Image (cartoon, grey):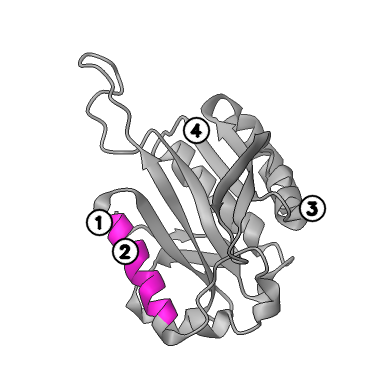
Amino acid sequence: MDDIVLEGRLVRLEPLGERHIEGLVAAAADRSAYQWTFVPATTDEAARYVATARAWQSEGSALPFAIVRRDDDRVIGSTRFWNLERWAWPAGHPRHGRNAPDAGEIGHTWLARSAIRTGINGEAKTLLLTFAFETWDVLRVCLHTDARNERSRAAIGRLGATFEGTLRSHRLAPDQTPRDSARFSIIAAEWPAVRERLGGLARD
């Protein structure tokens, strides 16, 4: 899975690696944009960020990307598939022996302030969802966000994801409190309608 590149009109999602470290630091320079998200602030933090993401990839639980703006080839953030699940399908089932995951989450997504509300987040999510449902043939994609993050909740809702509820004290928040997470999902049966919705948003 190391060589997967997903390319759209505005952005290119390319495998996250050490070559992106300085770009990540530059993209995260405006710290006021990251109240709800862990984002690397220094070169050392970015190096650990990349190393952790790559370690999870080696374990088979994640697939991290750098978000690169196509018109200037600048790194403007990061995103990843993670919490990838491979279900124990019994022998004889059509899905038995698959190499691809059956379900997973899209997360660890953040953008440079200059890229917020430019259509880039929507395009990146569309690229990831299309790959998940049409290449991997997953059955479910989940997205979580801090329950206090109204902008992120609204953006996930615009994708067509269904709000499933709130997970209490779910994860550590950047303010060092146990955050409540708003949980959303898209399942395979919903993907055709979501894909049409996303296509409509792109044309607007």
Label located before the other in sequence (2 or 3):
2
Image marks 3 and 1: residues in contact by CB distance under 8 Å: no
Label 4: which secondary element: strand
Q: Examine the rendered structure and indicate whether residue 201 appears above or below residue 191.
A: below
Image marks 1 and 4: residues in contact by CB distance under 8 Å: no
| Front disc: 3 or 1 | 1
Q: Examine the rendered structure and indicate whether residue 167 appears above or below residue 54.
A: above
What residue does disc 4 label?
Answer: 140
Crowding at dot 3, Cα within 10 Å, few <14 / some 14-19 / many 20+, comes out as few
| Residue 2 appears in the figure | no
Q: Quadrant of residue 159?
A: top right
Whole-percent x and y of residue 146? 65, 53
Q: CA–CA distance between discs 1 and 4?
A: 22 Å
Q: Nearer the viewer, residue 143 or 118?
A: 143
Label located before the other in sequence (4 or 3):
4
Image marks 4 and 3: residues in contact by CB distance under 8 Å: no
Amino acid at dot 2:
Arg
The reply to whether the magenta stretch includes residue 53 is yes
Label located before the other in sequence (1 or 4):
1
Q: Nearer the viewer, residue 170 or 114?
A: 170
The reply to whether the magenta stretch includes residue 50 is yes
Which label is found at residue 54?
Answer: 2
Residue under the image location 55 percent in, 73 percent down: 70
Q: CA–CA distance between discs 2 and 3?
A: 36 Å
Q: CA–CA distance between discs 2 and 1?
A: 6 Å
Whole-percent x and y of residue 140? 50, 33
Label 2: which secondary element: helix
Label 1: which secondary element: helix
Image marks 2 and 1: residues in contact by CB distance under 8 Å: yes
What residue does disc 3 label?
Answer: 204
What residue does disc 1 label?
Answer: 58
